[in-house]
Amino acid sequence: MSQPDTGAPAPKKALEVRCPSCGTMHLYSTENPYRPFCSKGCKAIDLGAWASESYRVEAKPSSEDLLDDPTA
Ligand SMILES: [Zn+2]
């Protein structure tokens, strides 16, 4: 980490990636079971968001929503 930033590609070293969930830069390590996420929590958040999104798509709108449907 004492190397100056010359713009050259980093040597084979620890790779830093951005966590898709929280955006924190963290080391991408094969020892990290949650990669590319920084932690278990972030992976859970991402999976939870995906699951809830899927659920919303699957769920049918209520009758109230149907009354407001502009495509009806
Ligand atoms: Zn994260």
Image (tube, grey):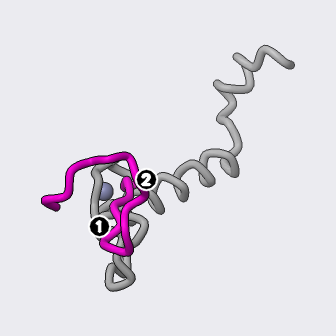
Closer to the eye: label 2 or 1: 1
Under mark 1, the amino acid is Leu
Determine which residue is flagged by label 1: 27
User: Image quadrant of residue 67?
Assistant: top right
Decide: few, some or many residues near mark 2? Use Cα within 10 Å; few <14, some 14-19, many ≥20. Answer: some
Decide: few, some or many residues near mark 1? Use Cα within 10 Å; few <14, some 14-19, many ≥20. Answer: some
Q: Is mark 2 within 8 Å of ligand 1?
A: yes
Q: Quadrant of the N terminus?
A: bottom left
Is residue 62 within the magenta segment?
no
Under mark 2, the amino acid is Pro
Residue at x-position 38% and y-position 46%? 7
- Foreground pick, 25 / 50: 25
Dot 1 lies on which element? strand
Residue 51 position, x and y percent, is: 54, 58
User: Image quadrant of residue 17?
Assistant: bottom left
| Total numbered badges shown on the rendered structure | 2
- Foreground pick, 12 / 36: 12
- Find the magenta span and give its range: 1-20
Question: Which residue lies most toward the bottom here?
Answer: 31
User: Image quadrant of residue 66?
Assistant: top right
Residue 3 position, x and y percent, is: 19, 58
32 horizontally vs 68: left or right? left
Q: Main secondary structure of the magenta part?
A: loop
Is residue 5 within the magenta segment?
yes
Q: Earlier in the sequence, mark 2 or mark 1?
A: 2
Q: Quadrant of ligand 1?
A: bottom left
Residue at x-position 86% and y-position 19%? 72
Residue 32 position, x and y percent, is: 33, 79
Dot 2 lies on which element? loop
